[in-house]
Image: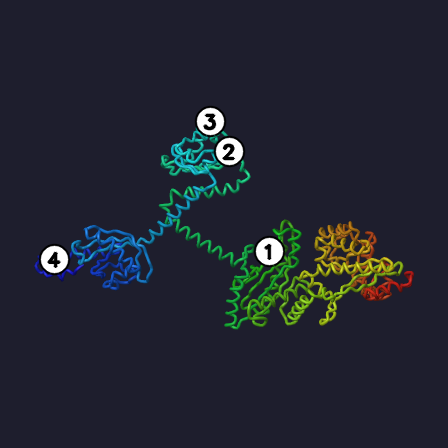
Amino acid sequence: MPELNSDPDIHTVSDATLTQLQLALREQQVILDTAGVGIVFVKNRLVIRCNQRLAQMYGFNEVSDIVGNANLTLYPDQSVFDALEDAALPVMTQGLVYKTELQMARQDGQLFWAHLTGQLVNPQDIEEGSIWIVDDISEQKLAQAQLESVLAEQSLILDNAMVGIVFLRDRIVTRCNRSCEIMLGYEPGELDGSSTRAWYLSEQDWTEAAYSCYAPFAAGEAFDGEMLLCKKDGTPAYCWVRAKAIDFNDPSKGSIWIGMDITARKKAEIELLQARTDLEKLVEMRTQELKRTVISLEKKAAEQKESEAHIQRLSHFDALTGLPNRVLLNDRSQHVLNIAWRSNQSVALMFLDLDHFKNINDSLGHRAGDEVLIEWARRLKSAMREQDTVSRLGGDEFVLLLPDTDAFGAAEVADKILQATLLPFLIDQHELTVTPSIGIALYPRDGADLDTLSKCADAAMYRAKEDGRNGYRFFTSAIQTHSDRTLLLGNALHRALERNQLELSYQPQISMLTGKTVGAEALLRWQHPELGNVSPAEFIPIAEGNGLILSIGEWVIRTAVKQLATWIEQGMPPITMAVNLSSVQFRNAQLPELVSNILSDAGLAPNLLELELTESVAMTNPLEAIAIMDDLHKRGVRMSIDDFGTGYSSLSYLKRFQVYKLKIDQSFVHDITDDLDDKAIVGAIISMATSLGLKTIAEGVKTAEQLDFLRARGCTEAQGYYFSPPLTAKVFEKHVRSALPTDTTSV
């Protein structure tokens, strides 16, 4: 627009005219400044004048930043500019207004949709320029696109739905999908324009349906229920029906009905319910989608944000206990250790594992185990400070991260945790005592990162378990050495069988009555070429932990049974072969069948095999033990309880165990001649066994005085260095063959 003071005739007008002109210019400026749309005056392809709204629309701070620029800069590229000019000029030169929608370009290159309205100042002279009104319609375009997408999705769902959908107006079909036609036995399009009367068996049914359905419609409610309808061929069909008025304030708009033949699909009610619910939501949304588009978008954005937050929580927190998981623990530990490094602070990491937690799952079920874990999480959190982290790695393993905590503070926390175990857990009317074993590692003494500290705390935790459980241990170099040896032995044990490093020794078992050898206990030995003689007390727990105990245990039973069969074939009088069972072996469901197969392969009578089971293993799950013992007993295999008296036995269970013999632990035999308590315990065991019809055998007999005491109390068998140490197979055979028949007084 040209400036007024450039017109030479301005000096010839009257003051009144000038005043009116100036007022008009001010009014025009106010319009430009307050307009909600962009207004620009273009002349010779340059921006001559525009309002602030246009400048903001294109990403400029001030009007002055855009005035004087080529109007080409407002377009994405030259081709768009040329196409608009070619389309607009023929219209505008006719004195008409040109309107279009076009993608424009902001200063930073970002595209946006705009509605353009342009008109020449003088259609007879395009050199005088043009005025354009620009309206940013990006949000409108986005909303329109989303609306079209939603409508398309709904149409696709309705047209392909497995349930019948029909639109009614005055009980006349205005539209239905193919599923509805199939459900009622009609050909495509046959229902269009028809009355719903044909769907009912009688006029009365049709009338009653109207009362049942249209009354809820008038109240703005939906009808939901089963109906007895009639197919085209007259066949009755029970259908589930869901219906609702499109607008309860205006019945003339009709209603939407959703139906499904449930005569033969009663078993699919769950799937049907879900489908019905989904379709109901789609139908209800259809009449409101235009006015609720913006609200729907905001809701979706909120739901997306909530979903992302939920996913974020699942990725960082344990689903069962709500405690931080390994991922969040790693994040927090990095933060805590960085602060500790800068501040020269100590950090404690505690690895906690519940003692005998598997027994809870096995006896009471995993739900009870989960409740114990949840309660444990609660108790641990209550014992911690706000800045501490209590995390669950999985199973019954917990890790505690304690910033700015030294050894003294860690010990206090461990004591608090152990104190919390004194209160029993009430689970399904069962009072459970659940204790932890805790390992503690300290930063920076034991490690500078989470992985190293975790390994150290884990090793210390296992030492706590080895030391009796229900306690805590700090990581030490000795534990590291033990852990390294455990790893070394575990790796070496994998090759021990195939390299023939394992062997059996046999210790004679002597009858108190005859003095003869009546049995042999097979004892496992491991002679490693580099590590030397490795004690079973050291490598058996390792084998139980890494799963090798089953194959090693099978080898022991098979080797011992085969050796006894060989001795008998070579003329040795039959004796009993005693073989120790580990807890893992005993809980193996295939054990009875395996033992029977080994005996069958060797051709050995089952009653010559005696399987020894420790008292603690038998009482861990007595009902399970009874079942396995019963199975072995039925197969003719004898069972004995080893180390009897060292654990806690229930006499009610003991009398139900299918056992042949009780083995008196050597800890009672060692001081039997001097210790009154040991005398009383051994005497009580022998007396009890005798009353139950069980044999007894005392292990660890070293002196004649011990032997005399046992014989006097009625013990039936004995073994120990007084008679013989464990022997190789060849030496054992010579020992038995060289023995002369003697009476008990010469033993």
Which of the two discs, 4 and 3, sits closer to the camera? 3
Quarter residue 209 falls in: top left
Pinpoint residue 197: horizontal percent, then vertical percent: 43, 29
Q: Which residue is mark 3?
A: 202
Q: Nearer the viewer, residue 468 or 518?
A: 518
Tag 2: residue type? Tyr
- Relative side of 220 to 78, left or right: right
Instruction: Specify few, some or many for label 4: CA neighbours under 10 Å numbering under 14, 14-19, or 20 or more.
Output: some
Q: Is residue 377 visible?
A: yes
Q: Earlier in the sequence, mark 3 or mark 2?
A: 3
Label 1: state its secondary structure: helix
Q: Give the quadrant of residue 480.
A: bottom right
Mark 2 vs mark 4: which is more N-terminal? 4
The amino acid marked with disc number 4 is Leu
Q: Considering only order in the chain, which callout, 1 or 4, is on the residue closer to the N terminus? A: 4
Neighbour tally class for label 3: few under 14, some 14-19, many 20 plus, Cα within 10 Å: few
Residue on which disc 2 sits: 238
> SS class of the residue under badge 3?
loop
Query: Label 3 is placed on what type of residue?
Result: Ser
Element type at marker 4?
Answer: helix
- Which residue sits at x=34%, y=51%? 141
Q: Residues within 10 Å of mark 1 (few under 14, many from 20)?
A: many
Of the pair 581 and 196, the residue shown nearer to us: 196
Q: Residues within 10 Å of mark 2 (few under 14, many from 20)?
A: some
Identify residue type, mark 1. Leu
